[in-house]
Image (spheres, rainbow, N blue to C red):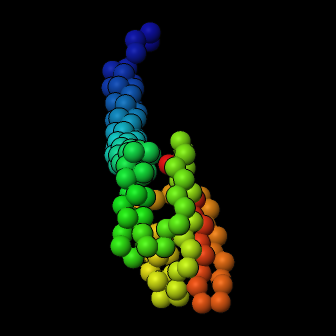
Amino acid sequence: MNRINPLYILGLLVAILLIVLYQNHALQKRIAQESASLVQLEAKAKEIATLKRYWGDAKLQKKRILSILSAPFISRFVKDKKVYKNKIHVSLKGVDAPNADRVMDKIFNSFVKVSSFKATQNKNSVDMEVEFAL
């Protein structure tokens, strides 16, 4: 009467095995979700690093700004250009309407940081003041 039935032991072992298998399956599912999340996080980190390299380089920004300002249809309107440590301030005077549109398109469609832009309309021309951030 003091003996334990072997079927009870076998049942207990089967129950423990089922619990372990269930936990193993749940853990593998969670690991798969975490690895997918890690892949997405790595892709986002690469994108951020690329954008930081592209936008954060002051020398590259300065080079882009100076190339925009040296374009033939823009350079003839540049009256004053001041280069500071962390910004470039440019005054464009006497820009006629069709060229004003081209100048604004060129500035705003380029990969440069524009911190301020001011346009004032005269009789037949437009005066612009642009401040680029480096």
Residue displayed at 42% across by 51% down: 62
Give x and y (percent) for residue 50.
Answer: 36, 48
Residue displayed at 36% across by 22% down: 9
Examine the rendered structure and indicate whether residue 125 appears above or below residue 1.
Answer: below
Q: As drawn, which residue projects farthest toward the top?
A: 2
Examine the rendered structure and indicate whether residue 122 appears above or below residue 82.
Answer: below
Residue 120, located in which quarter of the rendered image? bottom right
Nearer to the camera, 16 or 100: 100
Residue 41, located in which quarter of the rendered image? top left
The answer to whether residue 18 of the structure is visible from this angle is: no
Residue displayed at 55% across by 46% down: 84
Give x and y (percent) for residue 101.
Answer: 49, 83
Nearer to the camera, 41 or 92: 92
Residue displayed at 40% across by 15% down: 4
Q: Quadrant of the N terminus?
A: top left
Give x and y (percent) for residue 64.
Answer: 38, 57
Count of labels shown?
0
The answer to whether residue 57 of the structure is visible from this angle is: yes
Give x and y (percent) for residue 73.
Answer: 39, 76
